[in-house]
Structure formats: C-alpha cells, structure tokens
Amino acid sequence: MFRNQYDNDISTWSPQGRLHQIEYALEAVKQGSASVGLRSDTHVVLLGLKRSSGELASHQQKLFRIDNHVGIAIAGLVSDARVLSNFMRTECMKSKMMYDRPMPGSRLVNLIGDKAQINTQNYGRRPYGVGLLVASYDEGTGPHLYECLPNANCLEYYAISIGAKSQSAKTYLEKFIKDFGAADVDTLIMHGLHALRETLQQDKELNINNCSIGIVGKGENWRTIEGEDLKKYLDQLETGAPTTETTEELPQGEAMDTE
Amino acid sequence: MFRNQYDNDISTWSPQGRLHQIEYALEAVKQGSASVGLRSDTHVVLLGLKRSSGELASHQQKLFRIDNHVGIAIAGLVSDARVLSNFMRTECMKSKMMYDRPMPGSRLVNLIGDKAQINTQNYGRRPYGVGLLVASYDEGTGPHLYECLPNANCLEYYAISIGAKSQSAKTYLEKFIKDFGAADVDTLIMHGLHALRETLQQDKELNINNCSIGIVGKGENWRTIEGEDLKKYLDQLETGAPTTETTEELPQGEAMDTE
Amino acid sequence: MFRNQYDNDISTWSPQGRLHQIEYALEAVKQGSASVGLRSDTHVVLLGLKRSSGELASHQQKLFRIDNHVGIAIAGLVSDARVLSNFMRTECMKSKMMYDRPMPGSRLVNLIGDKAQINTQNYGRRPYGVGLLVASYDEGTGPHLYECLPNANCLEYYAISIGAKSQSAKTYLEKFIKDFGAADVDTLIMHGLHALRETLQQDKELNINNCSIGIVGKGENWRTIEGEDLKKYLDQLETGAPTTETTEELPQGEAMDTE
Amino acid sequence: MFRNQYDNDISTWSPQGRLHQIEYALEAVKQGSASVGLRSDTHVVLLGLKRSSGELASHQQKLFRIDNHVGIAIAGLVSDARVLSNFMRTECMKSKMMYDRPMPGSRLVNLIGDKAQINTQNYGRRPYGVGLLVASYDEGTGPHLYECLPNANCLEYYAISIGAKSQSAKTYLEKFIKDFGAADVDTLIMHGLHALRETLQQDKELNINNCSIGIVGKGENWRTIEGEDLKKYLDQLETGAPTTETTEELPQGEAMDTE
Amino acid sequence: MFRNQYDNDISTWSPQGRLHQIEYALEAVKQGSASVGLRSDTHVVLLGLKRSSGELASHQQKLFRIDNHVGIAIAGLVSDARVLSNFMRTECMKSKMMYDRPMPGSRLVNLIGDKAQINTQNYGRRPYGVGLLVASYDEGTGPHLYECLPNANCLEYYAISIGAKSQSAKTYLEKFIKDFGAADVDTLIMHGLHALRETLQQDKELNINNCSIGIVGKGENWRTIEGEDLKKYLDQLETGAPTTETTEELPQGEAMDTE
Amino acid sequence: MFRNQYDNDISTWSPQGRLHQIEYALEAVKQGSASVGLRSDTHVVLLGLKRSSGELASHQQKLFRIDNHVGIAIAGLVSDARVLSNFMRTECMKSKMMYDRPMPGSRLVNLIGDKAQINTQNYGRRPYGVGLLVASYDEGTGPHLYECLPNANCLEYYAISIGAKSQSAKTYLEKFIKDFGAADVDTLIMHGLHALRETLQQDKELNINNCSIGIVGKGENWRTIEGEDLKKYLDQLETGAPTTETTEELPQGEAMDTE
Amino acid sequence: MFRNQYDNDISTWSPQGRLHQIEYALEAVKQGSASVGLRSDTHVVLLGLKRSSGELASHQQKLFRIDNHVGIAIAGLVSDARVLSNFMRTECMKSKMMYDRPMPGSRLVNLIGDKAQINTQNYGRRPYGVGLLVASYDEGTGPHLYECLPNANCLEYYAISIGAKSQSAKTYLEKFIKDFGAADVDTLIMHGLHALRETLQQDKELNINNCSIGIVGKGENWRTIEGEDLKKYLDQLETGAPTTETTEELPQGEAMDTE
C-alpha cells in the first residue's frame, strides 16, 4: 500500500517542494457546488448554485452580504465560510469606526489572505476548506472581483468560477469575456446564468430554488435576487441556450479541473 | 488490514478534500435516539424519543429549555449537549443583560456554529458529538426551527429530524409539509408524533414514558408536555396510523441514512 | 494482531461515531467494588462494599461526606474520586459563602458533569476513572439520587447501583422499587443491603467490616453507619434472604454488564 | 512480538479499564528496599532497610523528618521521594505560619494524594516512582500510619510494609497485629525489626549499617535510631527469631507480591 | 519502499548533518516562475515572469513595492511572499517613524533572515516557501540587490535569478556581468529581459502580459513597467537575440539547478 | 530487530518499573573521563583525568570553582556541567546576599537534585548527562563530599569516583578508606592520584597535562593544582605503585561498572 | 533496513548514553568550508575559506565583527551563525552600557554555550548547525581564541581549525605551534594561510576571492583583510609551500575527522 509520508501535516514540505495538505484543502472547494462571478465596468455579479437539502429546509445559502459595498459567494465547507464572513464583517465595521470610510475590497482580501496563510504554516491548524468569490464596489476604483482560496492566494479576476465543474463555467466566461466590460447588469446576470448552467449535472436545470444572484455596483448597495424574482431571468435562459455544445467539445476541460 | 491515514486527526485533510473526523462525529448523532421538529406560521414543536434507562431512572432528558423563547432537542452525546446548552443559556442571559432583549434565534445558532467550528480546526480538540434542533420564537420574525450539527453547520428548516432512523421521520414530514404552515399546535403535535413513531424499532410503541414534546410560539413561552399529559395525544395516535406503510415502501431510505 | 487505531486518544472519533477511551474508562468503574443507592420520599441511602485491603488496614473508604446535605458513594479509581470530592466540597462551600444557601444537588451534579466533560474533549487528558452516586437533600425539592459517570453523564435515579456485579443489584432494586417511596429509613437500609449482597462473590458474606451505609434526608444531615453499628441491620439480613434465587435466574444479566 | 498499545501513556485507558503506566510505577516501589511501619495506641514506628552503596558512602537515607510530629519512610526512586518530602515540609511550615498549629497527618496525606493524582491524568507527566509510609502524631487524634502510593492512593494502616519482599513482612505483621495496640515503643521496635528481617535476601542479616528506625508519638517528637544505637535492639533480635519459618511456609506469598 | 526518517521535521538533523525540510522548501522556490535582478552603479532592476492564470484574471503579481527605496520580486508561494512583504513594509514604516530615515536595505534583509531562521529551528513551523530578490537604493551606499531564500540565507549579488530554469538566466548574466556596472537603466532592462527570456519554455515568448519590470535607483523611487509600456523594450528584444545558443550549450546547467 | 518501546521517553515507565532514559543518561557519565574525590576529617580533595584534546588546546577543564568553600569535579557532558555549575554559583551568591552566610554543601546538593529531578519527570526534557562530585567545607559541619547523578540522586561519600573505569578507582579507595580520616592533605592527594591512575588505559600514565587536583578544607578556600605544580606529587607516584595488581585481580569489576 | 530509534529527537538518550542529534549537528559544521584560528602572545588571527557562490555574488562572508575587541569565523549554517552573531553583538553592547567595559571573551563564550545548551535539552528545538571560532583581545588577559560547537562546548585553543578537511589544517598547526607565541602578526597570517591551504580540494588554490583574514590584538581593534589586500600574503605563499607533503602522509587523519 502506497503511503505518502509528507501529506499528513500542514507544516511538512514534500521532497518536491509541495505542501500536500494545502492541495487537499483545495479539493474541498472543488467538491462544493459552483459559484460564478463576473464584472462590468460598473458592477459585479455573483451567482451560486444551491445544492438541494431536501424539501424540508429553507434554501442553503451560497451568497453572503458583508457590507453595503461587499458581498461574497462560497464553495466548500459552509462552517469555514461562516467564520471567514464573520471575520470580514468585523473588519469592515472596524474600518468604518476607525477611518469613517468603507474598507477597500483589495485591503479586505489581503486580510483574508493573511488569516488563511497562518493556517498553512502552523502545526495543529488546517487550511480553510472553502473558496470565496468577493465582490466589492470601492469609491474611486470601482468594481472588483476577487477569488480567495485555501492556499491563501487572493487574485483579482474579470470573471471566474469555483466549485464542482467550475471549469465548464470558466470556458463559457472566457468565450464571452470581451462583452462584459460594457454590459449592463441584466446582461451580466444572463451571462452568469449561462456560465452557472454549465456546471449542472447532465439532467439538471436551473430553477428558482437552486440558484441565487448577488449584485453590487455603481450607486447600488449589495442586493440579492432569489426565488420568484429569478423567474424573469430564468425564462430568458430557456429560450436562448446555444452554448451547451461548448462543454461537449471540452470533456477534457472538466477532467483537468478534478485532477 | 486497510488503514486510513487521514482520519485520526481533526486537522488533517484527506486527499479527496474530506475531514473524516467530522464525518465520524456525525455518526455519533445518528446513534442517538431520534428527535423531530416542525413549525407552523406561529409555533415550533420539538419531539424527542427517550431511550429507556430502565425502571430505576427518572426519564432521560431529550428536550432542554434555553430561554423563554428558545428550547432544544438533542441526539447524540448527552454530556456534549449539556455543555452546548449551558453555553446557549449564558449567551441568552448576556443578551438580556446587555441589550435588554431576547437573543434572536438566528444569532444564537450562529454562535453555536462558531463554537463548534473551532473544534473542527484545531488539533487536540474533537468535534462535538451531538446534533441539536433549536426552536425559537423571535419578536418580529416569528417561529424558527434550526438544525445544528457537529460539522458546525446550522441550517433553518420547516421540519426536520435527527438521530437513529431519522430518515423515516423525514419521509413522513416531507409528505405532509404542505399542511404545517397553517396548522394549529395540536395538529403540529400529532404530525410530530407520527413522524417520531416512524423512528421506532419494529416492535416498539410510543408511550407516556418514552417521548416528550416541547412547544414555543406566538404568545407562548417554551413549555414541555411529558408523562400523563401526553396521554391525550397518544390516544389519538393509536386510532389513526395509516402512515406506517410508508416506511415499508422505503427500506432503502434508512439504508441511506446510515451509510 | 488486531489493532484499533481509534482508541488511544480521547479526542479521536471512531468511524462508527464512538469515543473508545470513554468506554474504557467506564470499564474502570465496573472493576470497582459495588455501591448502591436508593431513595424514599424523604431520604436517600447509599451503601458501599469495601474491598478488603487486609487485616493491616483501617477500612477502605467508599462513602464520603461532601456537605451537611450531600454525601457520595464511589466505584473505581479512589484517587480520581478524591479529586472530585474535593472539588464538590469546595463548590458547596463557595455556594454557602456567596449565596448563603446550600448548593442544590442538581446544580452540584451539573458542575461535576461539566468538569468531567472537559476531560473527554481535550487531547492529553483522560476521562475520570470513577463513578459516583450522589445523595442530596435539598430545601424545597427534597431527596435526590444521582449517578455521575466518566462519560460526563449525570442522571437522576430512584435507585441505582454501580461497580462490579452491579447488574445483580439493579435486578433486585427493580423488583422492589415500588416499595421505596413510602419506606422508612430502616426499610431503605434493609433493601440496600439486600441489593448490595447480590454483588458479592459466590462465597462471600456482608459483615461489619466490608460494608458501610450513608444517610441523608428530611431533618437529618449526612451520617454514616459503620462497624459495630451495622450489626443490627446485618443480623436481620441473615434471617431473611429469599432474593438470592434471582441472581441464579439471571446469569446472563451479569454477562451483559461486563461485556 | 507482543505489543501493548495502551501502556505508553499515562492518559490512555486500556480496553479493560486499566492505566498501565500507574501499574508500572507501582513496580518501581516494589524494587526499592523494604520499609516497615506499625503503631501502638500512642506511637508510630517506621523502619527502613538501607541498601548498601558500598563502603565508600555514608548510609543511604530511608527515613526523613518532615516536622516535629511527622516522619516518613520510603521505597522506590529516591529523587522522587526528595521532591515529595520537600513538598511535605513546605506544607507543614505553611500550616504553622497560617494557622499556628501543626498540619494534621490526614490533611498532609491528602495533599500528597492530590499532587500525585495530577501526574496520573496529564499527558507528558509520569506517576511518581516512590511509595511513602507516613507516621504522624496529631493533637487530639493521636498516632497515625499512612501508606501513599504512585496511584495517588493514601490509606491508613495499623501496620504495613512496602518495597521488595514486603509481602513477607506483612505476613509477620498480620500474625502479631493484635499485640501492637498496647505495646510500648521498644516492643514495637522489636516487632518492626522482625518484620523487616523477613524482607532480607536468603543470606543477609540486619546490622547497624543496613537499617534505621524512626519514632514519633505521645510526648515525643520524631527521632531516629541509627548506627551504634541500633545495637541493643539487634542483639535482642539475634537471640529470639522463631518467625523465620513463616516465610518458608509462604513462598507463594512473595510470588503474589511481584506478579 | 525507501523511507527517509529524518525529513519530516524541521527540527531534526539527518546523520549527514542536513536539514531536509529546508532543502524541500528550496524546491518550492525552484517551482515558481523565474525572477531576475541586476544592478548598475546607480540602479537596480528587477524582472519577473508572470505565469498565465488564464484570460479571466488580471495579471498575477510578481513585483511588490515595499517603500520608496525598496521593491521585491518573488518566486514560490505567493501567500508566503505576501506575509513577508507585509512584514517588510511594517519594518520600513517603523524605521521612518522611529529614526526619521529610510531603512537601509542591508538591515531590512537581515530582519527577513532572522524571521526566516526562526521557522527553521522550531518544531511545528515550516520554512517559508518563497525566494525574494530585494532591490534597494540607500542613502550613501547606493544600489543593492539581495537574494533571500527559505534557508534564511540573504546574500548580496551584482545580478541573480531565482525560480524555474533560473540557471539559464544566471548563465546569461555571468556572461555579461562586466557590462552592468556602467550601464544606463534601459541597457539594464534589456539585459534583464534577455536573461528572463532564457527561463521560458521552448515555445514561449515574452510579451506585454507575461512580464513586469521594477526599477529603483539614484534619484528615482521604486516604479514598475507593465503592459503596453513594456512594448518598446520587447520590440528591441525581438530584433536582437543572439544569446539563445547559450542555453543549448548548457543543458546540464539546468540539470544542476534542479538536482 | 528487538525494539524497546518504553525507552524513548523520560515520562514512560517500563513494565518492570524502570525509567530507561535515566539509565541511558547514567551511561553518558560512564563515558566521561574519571574523577575521584576523597576526604579527611578536615579536607576534601577532588581529582580529574583530563582527556587530551590535542596539542592545540588549552587543557580541558574537569574541576570548577563554585564558591570559596565549594568546588566540583565532573564526568560526562561538559555543556550540561556548565549549566549546573552556573546554577550552583548563582545559588551560592544568593545565599550570601540574602542570609549573609555561605550556602551549606548539603543544601546546595539538594538544590541540584531538585533541578535534576524535574528533567526526569517531564516529557520533552532529558535528564542531565553529567555526574558531579561536590566538595564543600561548611562552618560547623566541616568537610563534605557528594556525588550527584543524572537520576537526581545526591549521596554523601567518604571517597568516590565517577566516569570511565571508575570501578577500578573505587576498588583502590575501598582498600585504603580507613586511612583517609586522619590523613593530611598531601597524603589525601597521593591516595587520590593512585586511585585516578587505576582508571587509565593500559598504556597511559598520569602527567602534568592530563590531571588536575582541587582542594578545600579547614582554613583553606577552594584551590586547584595544575601543570608544573603537579610535578612534586607525580614524582612520588612513580616510585611507589604497588596497587596496580589490584586492577589486574578485578577485571570483572570494570565489567560490572559498564554493564 | 536499519532504523535507529534514538536519533530523531534531541531529548532522547541512546542506550549507549549518546545524543545522536548533537552528533548530527556536528556533521553540519564539518560540511562548511574550513576556518582557521591561531594566536600569538599579543594577537589572534582568524582565516576563512569562502566557498564560491559564482561570479554573480559579492563574496560570501566567513568572518564577522562582533565588537572592537571581538571577531568570529564560522563553519556551517550561515543563518544560524547570523542569529548567534546578532546575539553576541547585543550582549557586547549590553556589557558596555551596563558596566562601561568591553565584554571579556571568556564571558561571551560562556553565554553562547548556555544559549546553545538549551537547544540540546528541549524537545522541539534543534542544536545550532554552526561552529564558531571566537577571537578576542581582553584588557588584562590579552588575546584569546575559542571554539564553540553545536554541542554547546566552548574550549580555548592556541590554534584550531573547523569545517571541511579541518584535520589537515590542524596537522599543520600542531607542527608549528611552538612558533606562534612569539610570532608577529604577519608571521601568524602566513601560518594561517598555510594551514588553510591544507583544507583545499586537490586542484584548488587560495586566491584573493576565496579567503579572508581577521585580526584583533594588542592596540589593534578587529579588522579584516580581503580582496586585493590579500595579495601580498598570497604571493609569499606561492613561493614557499613545503608543507603539502604532510597531508599526503596523513590521509587517515582526514578520515578520522569525518567518521
């Protein structure tokens, strides 16, 4: 039986210079249902695919409000996400109290990175098991979209997706990325729904229960669209779906994502 | 002999991105006797199946009062439940003293989640071995029913069951969930008893000793019904029990629950 | 050679959701000599079987006074019992000093449970290796009898036994439990002695050296009966012992207890 | 090769409910040379067998003065004994300074038990490797003799022996225990020497170099008899030694002691 | 299966006097994309090769501003680099506040070394997984270029490269090192780009997206050249590239780098 | 391959009641070059055999001054000896400052024992790897000679030797021990040199470079004799050496020492 | 496969009384390039062999100034050396501030020994991986040369060498040691260079880049000779090199050094 002696402990390097525990935590993100983010020159839109927890539950939450100007979407361990979102809310409040101004998105994302890095260097901790998409609209610098991962990396993106089958969503986003900059919010949402649909299992469809949308942007605080309000977007989706061939052309894309 | 090298330590990820110790703690919940919760638009009812500790004992407690507006039902390690319920009582008292208002259920449940999450990320601790159903009636937002699990997830439900054979109870609840919203308390109780009965061993019956009921809702502080007071509900149960076929149709449901 | 990889550490769950170290500590209680407790509507009586430590020793102590209104009987590690009884005495004193009233039994037992639970959740500690029977007489609520075990469970009983062959004593107690409520102290004592006798080895008998009795109740502070004072009760025991067939009918009961 | 996986760590229970590390520490006591203690109604006498550390050394110390009214004899690790005797001296001094009265023997022995228990419950410590016989003469309650062992048990005895071949000494003591109560000090000493002689190797004899005697009692502070002063007792011993057959009758007794 | 028993723990020496965990961390640096640094008598230039994170992302950052007079380039774990650059920024600020002068580069580099060394000597930490090139321009001593590695070594260089295939860059730099001292900034940049090009995969080319340049020097605060501004340098590069034979002559050089 | 599972950890007892790590540390003492101590009624003399560290070094120090009235000789780890001698010097200074009198030798030796014992009971420490001979001359009680070992035992001796082949020295000392009490200092020294010579390898001789002598006694502060000053004693040694047969008679003595 | 179970942990003794981790750390010193030290009656000279880190680097530093009257040469881990030299500088500064006099070399060396010893006795630390030669010129006692090793030993020498092939240098030094006392500084330097040359690989030569010299002595603060200033000494070396046969006569000497 093969035994990897370097992968039990976050503070142990492998001979190849890898930290296996970080890589395993990234797997936890890939097992969460997908989230998608994309931005125009004025807005950021986040979308999340809600896994069914049966008829008995209210809907599982994929999007969280952090502040008026910040919202997040998650993929992975919900409890780790709650810890991080509580942390972000507290930091945003502190910024308001101490400096009388909203926390810039880049600063907030740096704080998450620092917090996550500690868990990658000290024996007895584990890396967080959740990935975050962070949407912010900052005075002066406008809309921003960041991805924060268990390896403590926080990168800025024009559009991105995390979670199960997120590679399919990314393929869609790359195809249409030129269109996002000048798009209005409704167009962004439709692109996001198309991308999110790519992450569905073969026989599933988006509906008013299994997805939610969050928006922040110029002159608009963070707000979410859920339930019946999704209907007008989903109805448009039904009619125009020429993008599904794309995933059929790229089965190896998904393979790459899970390897 | 197969040896899983990633499942001894709460701070170790498996290569598949799983935290096995959390999953094992969830097993502890499945081994406790079942609890059931369901809510109408005005009330929440919790029901617990008390395991016999023989004729010598007073009855084992499945329901606990936290505050006037909050009660819980448990499944799993009783001693862990006591620690968590002490914690909840203290937090509710603090809220009253500091803010002069009852702790909202959602806030309370978040605090439990944060406390439980710590035990899932630090070497040398173990996840709690108990699941909680939390019933609260909050000023303004009305009745709420939450499930809190060892993985630090706390979700809101319309109706839910935890513990041994809880899948059978859930099957019952899903069937009648449409009826709960407008139901009066007695109807909720009768549905709860029917669901609870589904979790019994083949040859067992509900009686005044092996179950207890807790209620909180509009204009009504948390109160429990036990012993002789249960009689009037159990008597109704005897007569009308057309739901037992359901479990016979679903042996694979139970299998799913324990796998 | 079979090796259980989940049972060395108190903070490790087995895949079946068990904490083996807690179960092993419960074994330590089963290896102590038996203690018996039973209560009427006005009194609680505890009885302990003292293992011979030879002719050279004063008698090994099985019963301990905690406060005027509280006494305990133990089974298992004597040194762990001493730590816990010191703790209980201190808590009772604190209660008197701070609130000017005796500590209620239920509160005291909760404190033991909390203290014991800590040792079941932190790496590097071990669960206590002792079971306690706690007898208290509280203003207002009257007599109480509790059992506190290494798993941090503390339950209230009408009558109970812990330690080696305690199942035989329980069988006796269940048979006569209906009689205890209205019994006077001497009758309680005689029932207790009968139950305790069931836990003896084949060829042993109760005598003034190997047992001791503790009583607390209405208008009566904790007091113990030992040595010559036991004679008048033991003499009655000799004459009437129709209960010994019971254990012969239930060899499988004992087997259950030790498995 | 048989490997016991439960005996390396003081905080690990075996499946049989045993703490092997405590049992192993008790072995260390059995490997020390023997000490004997016995008491009358007015005095306590301790005797120790000094192992030869060659002609070059002053005599190895087996008896230690703790306070005017307290002395001890040891068997096992000398360095652990020194730590414990320092602790006892400090506690006795504190008692005098704070309460202006000598520390009662029972209280002192309880403090040792508490200190020793901590080392039986925390990972990274080890149980003390020494047994103590504690002799005290207390105002009011008179003479006391206690045995304190690595398992943190502290019991009171009329007469007792610890260390190598102590079972043979106990056999002697049990035979004559009836005589001790009313005996004068010199008679106690002679009984003690007879008991101590039982622990010698086949071809060894007691002499003024290999034993020492300590006495505390009514009107008499702790004092020791060593060297030439032992002569008058040892001379009596030579003439009357009818007890040696006893050990020859009981080879299995010794076997029991070391198993 | 070969098992190295000395390489799991940063605080364990191998019999050959090696600390394997430090060597493994150095591997992490070799897996990052390359960075190049070189200096004249008046300026330091840093260049970094940005790995593509797809069309969706803004560019991955390889260069970081620390202070007006200090900038860095990195290779290895980005999250570790962020921790170290935050540390450096804080130290530079402290220097300004406390001594009212910029932190000298040599002092800053010493502080990094001290911080990194701690992680190489304490169990439970891991060495940082990132290499840094530090460029500073100090009052009085002029331009400095340092390399800081996970082994806590910080050396000064005239020109240096770290990361994947950095050996090829070093070979280029050694060839032209005589020319750097008197070179103007544009010449330094061109040499740096030539060196950086040596680290590319067979079929890749430098372009405005995959590289960035940082400059600090006499009369010039740290500034970076990225995107379109790179064009004028890259255009020159296209035309004159006689150095590519060098790497073909030295395949064993690369081999040395990764052994 | 035999594997002892009880000897890696200072806080683990073997089933036989042994602490192997202490025994292994005693081996370290046996590997140091020998030291010898002996005393008369007025003086103590210590002698040490200095291992050659080549012609390049000043002589390796075997004797250390602690205070005017205290000196030590060592065998084993020099660095551990330095820690302990620093400790002793500090304690002696404290005694002078606080009580205005020299620290009695017995008290000093007790402090060493306490300090050494801590390292024998706490996981993560190791026993000291050095043995000490402590010579003191105390007001009132006169000259004292103690041996302090890694097991935290500190015994008083008339004469003693530690280190490699110390058994041979002890054999000499036992033979002449009767003569030491009344001997003058020069006679003590000659006896000490004879004893020390017994510890030499077959073909080695004592000379002015490989031994040193320390003296403390009545009216004489600690002083050492080294180098040329040794000559007058070594010259006497040459002529009269009838004791060498002794070691030849006792090859098994040495064997005993190292087993 | 042979597995040494006693060599992973600095706090574990082997059955032979050895601390393997200390021995392994000494290996790290042997792998550093050599340093040489020698002293006359008035001066100390240190010489270090600088390993080439290529044409790109400034020279690797082997000698470090600690204070006006103290300098060191190192062999082994450079980062550990930096930590220790920072420590020494701080201690020297403290001495000046508190006592208004330079720290005596012997005191400084003792402080290093104490600091290093801590890392040899506590689990979770590792011994330093560097050897130091310390040169000091003290008021009153004149020039001193010390060697400090990872085993926390600090010895004084007339002349010494550490690092790779240092045995060859020692052989040279032993041959000429008689000449050093009265030598002037230039003669000391030439002897040092001859000794250092003995440590070179077969086909290497000393040059102005690969060695450096440090001097401290009577009336002369610590100063170093490097680069072009070395030329006049190296030129002399070329002409007179009759000592090279020595190493050819002693291949077994080197073997001894590395065993």
Image (cartoon, coloured by chain):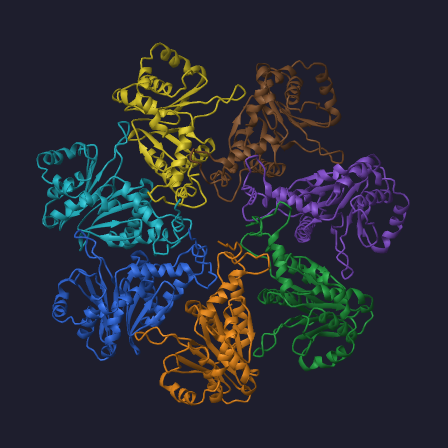
Chain colours: A yellow, B brown, C purple, D green, E cyan, F orange, G blue
- Screen quadrant of the C terminus of chain B: top right
Q: Identify which residue is drawn at 47% across, 61% down.
A: G13
Q: Identify which residue is drawn at 71% across, 20% down.
A: B233
Residue E28 in view in this figure: yes
Q: Identify which residue is drawn at 39% across, 40% down.
A: A115
Residue A218 in view in this figure: no
Residue A73 versus residue A219: which sits nearer the camera?
A: A73
Q: Identify which residue is drawn at 38% across, 39% down.
A: A20
Residue G250 versus residue F216: which sits nearer the camera?
A: G250
Which of the 4 quarters of the picture holds residue B214?
top right
Q: Residue furthest top?
A: A239
Q: Position of residue C163 (x, y in %)?
A: 72, 45
Vertical relation: F219 (above or below) B36: below
Q: Position of residue C117 (x, y in %)?
A: 61, 43
Q: Position of residue C196 (x, y in %)?
A: 80, 45
Vertical relation: E37 (above or below) F102: above
Residue E223 versus residue C151: which sits nearer the camera?
A: C151
Lateral position of residue A251 relative to residue D188, left or right = left
Q: Position of residue F218 (x, y in %)?
A: 51, 86
Which of the 4 quarters of the picture holds residue G208?
bottom left
Which of the 4 quarters of the picture holds residue E207?
top left
Vertical relation: B240 (above or below) D139: above
Vertical relation: C122 (above or below) E53: below
Number of on-image labels: 0
Lateral position of residue A8 relative to residue G158, left or right = right
